[in-house]
Structure formats: structure tokens, C-alpha cells
Amino acid sequence: MDNARRSSSDRELEILTDGGCGESRSHLFDNRACQRREAVIGCARLPAARSIENEEANTRMLHPFKDLDDLYETGLHLAQMPDAKRRRARFYHLMQLFALTGGLDGETIEAGCFRGLSSFLLCHMTRRLDPAFRGQTHTVVDSFEGLSAPVAADKTGREAEGRFSNTSPEHVRRTLAEFPDVMLHKGWIPEVLQGLPEKRYRFAHVDVDLYTPTLHCLAYFYDRLTPGGMIVVDDFGPWPDGGRYPGCTTAVMEFCAERGLHFAALNTGNAVIIRHDGL
Ligand SMILES: C[S@@+](CC[C@H](N)C(=O)[O-])C[C@H]1O[C@@H](n2cnc3c(N)ncnc32)[C@H](O)[C@@H]1O
């Protein structure tokens, strides 16, 4: 089959079955693409990875994302945040999902950054593709004054309003010091979205917890996604019990029902929407 016509899942499968390095299948990969892929999945070159005797290489092949834990812990330290078991697993998914969009056109954006932990991780994943990356294609939007007012769908009282206000643009700049060109937009969703420059996105992370801003972010970002691009929503809620933010769950379900879209809900609580039209 002509390489250009192979589906991305065919290529993904071959990357997994030959350790990602394509030594014996170099007709499938040019060397640069292979190096880019190695950087994304975080494995070293593994020419002997198929040898059962090579225990270390096989362990690394089974855990190609092992180093994401270290990155997460560095991010926690910079953002000055405590660990949370469920968040760690959710962000582990977030980083891997993000990496899947690495080859697409378009920029990246996060709505709801708090102290910058998740944007720190996303920027590091982009740097694996582009070592010179300084944040210039990543945008962050936040009130920096915490959550907005909940509505009935949120099933919570006014006490939620203002939660996560103990941050600032300066705090996020410090967390993202390695990425000085990240664009920070301070303001309330939905109004702040209208002031963003018009762009196409390959990936959007929506982490604003409540019904109203989640629904607005989904509409705004989905319409600007590159085909194949992805939205990951942080607070859909883990299966089977749901999470702390039922308004976010409702927003995802309403949005997808209205647009006729499928989504995947992960047991860590994140939901995933992929734009398929035009593929
Ligand atoms: C759970 S925190 C985000 C956590 C972050 N993604 C991280 O890495 O830790 C939710 C964020 O959404 C922001 N937010 C909530 N509602 C908003 C709204 N209507 N407009 C702008 N920001 C909002 C809050 O200020 C807060 O920083």
C-alpha cells in the first residue's frame, strides 16, 4: 500500500509492534519522522527491543510514558500544588492524548489553568516535538479570579464561586518560565473568548469545572479544531460514579447530542471529543 494512503492507525500499530524505531522497516518512516515519534513517546532508540533477553529495553517498551511521572512532579513543584491521586492519572491520560495530535496543523489552548500545572505539561509535550519551543503556539485563558457563578445544572451552591482564585498571571508565568512566549488571556468565559485572535487548534484542554463556561468553550473550540483535532474536558467525571462537577458532565452531553458527536469518557474523569469531519 502506498505510504501516503496508509491510515494513521496502521502506522501507529507498526510503531508499537516494532518498538517505534523502524530499523527493519525504514521504508515506512523517514529518519526524521522516526526521531520525532521517539521524542513523543519518550522511548530511546530500541534496536534490540524485540529480544526477550533484553530486560531493560523490554521494560521501557512496556512503559514508554514512564517519564511522564517525573514531569508531573516537576510541574507540581513549580505550580506549588499538592498531589492528588486522581489528578495524576487524569493528567497522565491528558499528556498521551495530547501527543496523539502532535502531527496535526494548528495551535493549542487551555481554558482554566489555575496555577499552570496542566499547561506546563502540555508545553513540555510540544517541546518533545520541537526542542526550540518557547510556548509561542500555546494560549491560556483564565479569569485568574476563580470559578464563575454556578447555575442550576451545576447542582452546587454559591460557595463554588471564586474557588481556585488563589493564583495570578504572575504565578502562571513563573510555572511556565521555560515557555515565556505562551499567550495568557485574563478574563471571564465566554466574553474573553470573543477577544482571542482567530486561529485553528489541534488541541484544546477545557478545565473550567462548571456548566456555562464548559459549554461555551466546547462550541468555540470545536468550531476551530483542525480535522483530527481533539478537545479533552477535565471534569466530565470518572466512570461509574461521576465527579464533583455534574454541570460539566451535562455540558459535554448536551453539546455532543446537539452536534451529533461521539465522545469517550475515561475512568479518570476526562472526556475526549475528536473532530472527524473533513478527514
Ligand atoms: C480546576 S481549575 C484549573 C486547573 C488547571 N487546569 C491545572 O492544571 O491545575 C479551574 C480554573 O477555571 C477557571 N475558570 C472557571 N470558570 C471560569 C470562567 N467562567 N472564566 C474564566 N476562567 C474560569 C478558574 O479561574 C480556575 O483557574
Image (cartoon, rainbow, N blue to C red):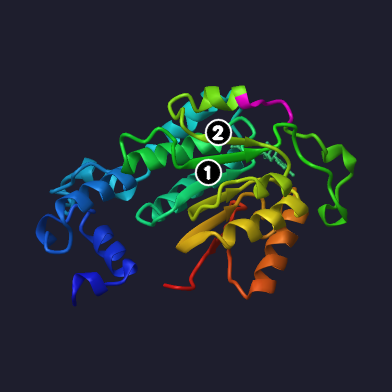
Pointers 1 and 2 in contact (CB under 8 A)? yes
Read off the magenta span: 165-169
Question: In the structure shown, which secondary structural element does the residue marked by tag 1 occupy?
Answer: helix
Q: Label 2: few (<14), some or many (≥20) within 10 Å?
A: many
Residue 202 horizontal side relative to residue 8, left or right: right
- Secondary structure mainly formed by the magenta segment: loop
Residue 13 visible somewhere in the drawing: yes
At x 82%, y 52%, the residue is 154
Residue 168 horizontal side relative to residue 72, left or right: right
Q: Is residue 167 magenta?
A: yes
Amino acid marked by disc 1: Phe
Q: Is residue 73 above or below residue 264?
A: above
Q: Toward the viewer: 169 or 274?
A: 169
Q: Is residue 199 above or below residue 83?
A: below
Q: Position of residue 260 (x, y in %)?
A: 63, 76
Q: Tell me if the residue at label 2 has its CB under 8 Å from ligand 1.
A: yes
- Distance from disc 1 to disc 2, alpha carbons, whole Å, reads 10 Å
Q: Label 1: few (<14), some or many (≥20) within 10 Å?
A: many
Q: Position of residue 52 (x, y in %)?
A: 18, 52
Query: Which mark is on residue 117?
Result: 2
Q: Position of residue 204 (x, y in %)?
A: 54, 51
Residue under circle 1?
91
Viewer-nearest of discs 1 and 2: 2
Q: Tell me if the residue at label 1 has its CB under 8 Å from ligand 1.
A: yes
Query: Which mark is on residue 81?
Result: none
The tag earlier along the polypeptide, 1 or 2, is 1
Question: In the structure shown, which secondary structural element does the residue marked by tag 2 occupy?
Answer: helix
Residue 237 visible somewhere in the drawing: no
